[in-house]
Image: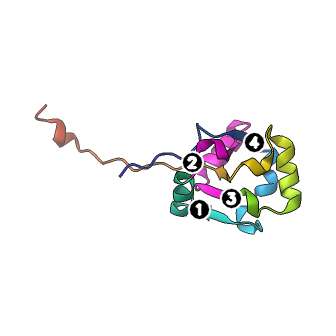
Amino acid sequence: MIMSKGHFYSAGESIEYGTAACLFPVDELDATVLQHRDAQLALDAVDGDTVIVVSPTSLATGYKLGGHPVTVIRVDSLPADITATLDAAVEDDIETFDLIQIGKWNHSSPNYSLAEFTDA
């Protein structure tokens, strides 16, 4: 089964990594945080326009986000101070969004052997 890559390209909004620094480290965040498969399932359950994506601002932050496991944070579970910070960074009201996505997942593709192509 091929999983989509979330709403990385169809998100309703994006927040730059520097602005989203208040979300890191996610393990210490007092909010509903889902990772890996649970995050994938949460992203599959919503429309892209209700997702905010944390976007890189440089090669270094792109590398950091690229190595981060796909993570979803429920917007309605964020503490008030973080909600206020993020609300100032998005055009629409922060409460119109359901999830914040950090990182994107890769789907697994079949491993092919060169021997499979010898009859071609």
Label number found at residue 35:
1
Q: Amino acid at mark 2?
A: Lys
Please, what secondary structure does the residue beneath circle 1 have?
Answer: strand
Identify the residue under disc 3.
Answer: 73
Q: Nearer the viewer, mark 3 or mark 1?
A: 3
**Nearest to N terminus: mark 3 or mark 1:** 1
Q: Residues within 10 Å of mark 3 (few under 14, many from 20)?
A: many
- What is the CA distance from the residue labelled 2 to the residue labelled 3? 13 Å
Identify the residue under disc 4.
Answer: 15
Please, what secondary structure does the residue beneath circle 2 have?
Answer: loop
Q: Is residue 53 magenta?
A: yes
- What is the CA distance from the residue labelled 1 to the residue labelled 2? 11 Å
Magenta-tinted stretch = 46-73
Residue 7: x and y, percent?
58, 43
Single out the residue that lies furthest toward the left: 119
Residue 103 drawn above or below residue 10: below
